[in-house]
Amino acid sequence: MTRFTGKNVLITGGTSGIGLAGGRRIIAEGGMVILTGMNEDRLEATRKEFGDKAVVVRNDAADPAASADLSEIVKSAGGIDGLWLNAAFAALGPPEEIHAWDFDRMMATNVRGPMLQLAKLSPLLRPGTSIVLTSSSSTYEGASATSLYAATKGAVLAMSRSWASAMAPRGIRVNVLVPGPIESNLRSFLPDEARHGFERFVLNQVPLGRVGTADEAAAVALFLLSDDSSYVTGSQYAVDGGLIMH
């Protein structure tokens, strides 16, 4: 397949998990990618893996100034045909354990980050660009430990609908990927016992009875980023093994 030949795609949070899987697939289909991340080891490993097929940069979505930095990189690339706003930060815990720092950091990364990124990058989006935002099935699950994270990902769903309306006159589409339990590093900050307990709680509700892979989630994101979805905008695509279909 060569769906991305001659196309540039920016993926925030692109040095691990589903973002990295998506970057690999875009390059395999003839595209070029700009990938952002925070972890220096992952940044370096991604640079070595992709070579001149990718621009890999450290960029913190929580930093208000980082959006301007990102726009300069995109200008140097001559614009983009795809924008996948995928970077996220998560901290889990019951409502009683949520503190102002948790709230500020998560809202800054997961909500303000993509909002400011789009504001700066909008003039650099080529006609026909596809925008994909990563939300989460946490928005629908009602798990006791995910109230703040779920709230930020619910905000992503809300703003995507407004963006779809705002961008439609330019021929730019906006859609949302809603991953469920996917193998990634998102829950790696949890102790093993807590992580396994959380995954068991979720998996007990998944009709397919297993965790999804990063490649499976990335495949749906690439459908939305490609011309295969040229008449799709303002939509949500769940990749969750059936978790939220009830």
Image (spheres, rainbow, N blue to C red):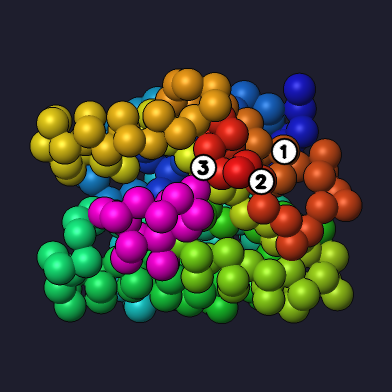
Span highlighted in magenta in the image:
136-152
Kind of residue at badge 2: Tyr
Is 225 positioned to the left or the right of 14 in the image?
right
Q: Which residue is mark 3?
A: 179
Q: Residues within 10 Å of mark 1 (few under 14, many from 20)?
A: few
Give the structural element (helix, strand or loop) at label 2.
strand
> Which kind of residue does numbered mark 3 sit on?
Pro
Residue type at tag 1: Phe
Name the residue tied to disc 2.
237
Residue 182 in magenta?
A: no
* Dot placed on the residue nearer the N-terminal end, 1 or 3: 3
Depth check, front residue: 229 or 1: 229
Residue 246 in which image quadrant = top right
**Residue 39: % across, % down:** 23, 45
Is 215 placed above or below 39 here?
above
Disc 1 and disc 2: Cα gap in Å?
10 Å
Q: Which residue is mark 1?
A: 223
Do the CB atoms of the residues marked 2 and 3 lie less than 8 Å apart?
no
Write the residue at 29% across / 55% down.
Answer: 144
Residue 189 placement (x, y as % from top left): 17, 43
Asked if residue 102 shows in the view, the reply is yes
Q: Secondary structure at mark 3?
A: strand
